[in-house]
Image (cartoon, grey):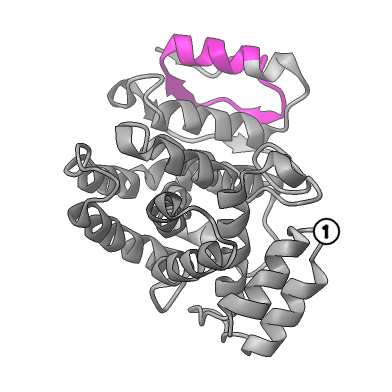
Amino acid sequence: MATAPSSLPGFTEQNIVLPQRLWNRLEQYADDTAREPGEVVAEALRLLFSGAVPTAAASVSGVAAEDSESAPIAAVASAANSGNVEMQLADVTDEAVTSDKLFERLCQVMEAVDKRDGFTGSHSRAVSELALALAKAMDLPEPEHRELEIAALVHDLGKVRVPEEILGKRGRLTADEWALVKQYPEFGAEMLAGHEGLQGVRQVVSAHQERWDGSGYPNGHAGDDIAIAAQIVGLCDVYTVLTSERSYRPALAPDTARRTIESGAGRLWNPELVRKLIDTALK
């Protein structure tokens, strides 16, 4: 066990206690390229949550990075929520992608995730239904429909590792908070790693926040480098978010949401998908 080494850049105090080998990896991560403090914290959490180090051996008493002291501590506290969800997922590890038991369990899990993110309805189920309708409108092969339906259902799974006070924050996120939020697609993919039948789903979950012009995250992929299933889920997610009532704002009218989507065609989203969504799936 070791306290935070002073070589990590940007920290104003060092009071984290973690396994020495994790700190060694974080030092290397910070030294490879210039990293913001929030990126280092997010990487530490990713390593912990992914099982790269034993979480039982880690004790985090606090960390203070420039401009943000609460987000990293709160993020570690949210591990309890993540553990709860992962226990529920463990019960269906061996279920096939076509299993009704798997689908119903995922629906239950995602209802809880939606509530943490400030949705008043079944957001994830709505994204799943719209994505399936768009896939059919795009004439995607029928064998791919079930995998897409599930990927759309669990696209926000990784948000269970993001504190509720960040998810529901009405003001501008700090650099630390935003660095953590941008990790959630990969968090979700990691949480599904033990499900052999969901490897295709994991790829969609990881990439659904990528954008047509490369401005998305976590990897900045663009155009056709983004799998069509991830493009579909990302677009349907945005439309459903816009038209969903949340705990801190009312839903937009469908016409307003459609105009918003159209304004991003060719920039944020595949223009063909936008056209199909508006002309067929939303009819």
| One can see residue 157 in this view | yes
Q: Is residue 281 above or below residue 35?
A: below
Relative depth, front residue between 96 and 218: 96
Q: Is residue 279 above or below residue 208?
A: below
- The structure residue drawn at horizontal position 83% and vertical position 58%, both measured from the top left corner, is 267
Query: In what element is the residue under mark 1?
Result: loop
Q: Quadrant of residue 43?
A: top right
Q: Quadrant of residue 252?
A: bottom right
Q: Is residue 207 above or below residue 159?
A: above
| Residue 226 percent across, percent down from the top left | 66, 43
Magenta span contains residue 10: yes
Question: Relative to residue 86, is residue 243 drawn left or right?
Answer: right
Q: Classify the position of the C terminus by image quarter.
A: bottom right
| Region rendered in magenta | 5-28
Relative depth, front residue between 200 and 163: 200
Q: Classify the position of the N terminus by image quarter.
A: top left
Q: Residues within 10 Å of mark 1 (few under 14, many from 20)?
A: some
Residue topped by disc 1: 267
- The structure residue drawn at horizontal position 71% and vertical position 86%, both measured from the top left corner, is 256
Q: Is residue 282 above or below residue 6?
A: below
Looking at the rendered structure, the kind of residue marked 1 is Arg
| Residue 240 percent across, percent down from the top left | 55, 73
| Residue 140 percent across, percent down from the top left | 53, 55
Q: Quadrant of residue 89?
A: top left
| Residue 47 percent across, percent down from the top left | 47, 25
Question: Relative to residue 154, is residue 175 drawn left or right?
Answer: right
| One can see residue 195 in this view | no
Magenta span contains residue 219: no
Relative depth, front residue between 194 and 69: 194
